[in-house]
Amino acid sequence: MKVGIAFNVTHFNQAGALVHIYTDGSMLVNHGGTEMGQGLNTKVAQVVAHELGVNFERVRVTATDTSKVANTSATAASTGTDLNGKAAQDAVRQLRERLATFAAEKFGGGTVAASEVRFANDRVIVGDDAIPFEEVVQKAYLARVQLWSDGFYATPKLYWDQATRQGRPFFYYSYGAAVSEVVIDTLTGEMRVLRADALHDVGASLNPALDKGQVEGAFVQGMGWLTTEELWWNDNGKLMTHAPSTYKIPTTNDMPADFRVNLFKNRNAEDSIHRSKAVGEPPLLLPFSVFFAIRDAVSAVGDHKVNPPLNAPATAEEILKASMR
């Protein structure tokens, strides 16, 4: 699979963030993305902590609020981390520069330049001295250094002419591949995924555990979309698949018996946040391998002499119908 990453409405590709540092060394971050279980807030907090060389526990992310960060774009098109991570990085880098300038003057004795000040291991390193981060913050507050900043990011290189259908609608591409093995029951049409192998390109992963979980979840979701989640209406036009009792989403029993997911080790060629890549929606396409494996199994019923059409979702009824052709 190959998926372009960006909104193809160019002006949606922007984000803002607001970062506060408190006198105890803790930080509060607000950005324009919506946390919906995908780990966006965790990644943004990691970006902030990394830029200031502090422990992750110092950073707290609050729920999106347009009274703090206005004109937010939707958290969609798998751009949540790309946009909001960069915006938060912009804000915290301004804070780092202010603190570095202050620390060089306060602790460097005029012999250390601001560019030589380093932030690591919860310390601010000025020459041979490593001062606790919160101490630097407290002294900066007393010296009336601004301890909050806003950040902004607009995805570069994008342009698109809807009339001529020309331009560059995507910043970069996400890639992935999957192989699946299934078995079908030719008497009932039931099927089981015996094994699935997926390899997905997330660039230089910000959080491999989150990214791997996203790939696994997207794979199972897509598998349900292609095999069980059938919509049907009665003769009066009423939707009958309207609840979990009738709309068959995947369960733990539908998981591949042998499920292997790996992240492709690769840095993004474009200047995304820490050279990572989007991971939200693209893996949803990987379970097409399940659908094609079912189609191949159906073809095997006739010793591959015919390849009968198989409708999606490939429910037991559709598999049985195709096997009988």
Image: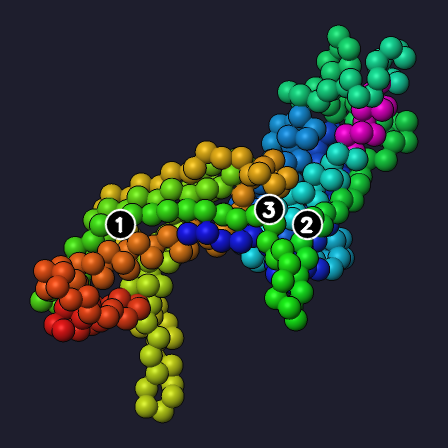
SS label for mark 3: helix
SS label for mark 2: loop
Distance between the Cα atoms at labels 3 and 1?
A: 29 Å
Q: Is residue 164 left or right of residue 134?
A: left
Asked if labels 1 and 3 touch by Cβ distance under 8 angstroms, the answer is no
Which stretch is magenta? 95-104
Q: Which residue is mark 3?
A: 81
Q: Is residue 237 visible?
A: yes
Q: Residues within 10 Å of mark 2 (few under 14, many from 20)?
A: few
* Residue 49, horizontal then vertical, whole percent: 65, 32
Q: Which residue is mark 2?
A: 157
Dot label at residue 180: 1
Tell me the quarter of the image containing the C terminus: bottom left
Rendered position, 46 above or below 257: above
Residue type highlighted by circle 3: Thr
* Residue 231, horizontal then vertical, whole percent: 35, 75
Q: Nearer the viewer, mark 3 or mark 2?
A: 2
Principal SS element in the magenta part? Answer: helix
Distance between the Cα atoms at labels 3 and 2?
A: 18 Å
Residue type highlighted by circle 2: Lys
Q: Is residue 58 visible?
A: no
Q: Residue at left 87%, top 31%?
A: 145
Q: In the figure, residue 127 lies in which quadrant?
A: top right
Rendered position, 206 above or below 13: above
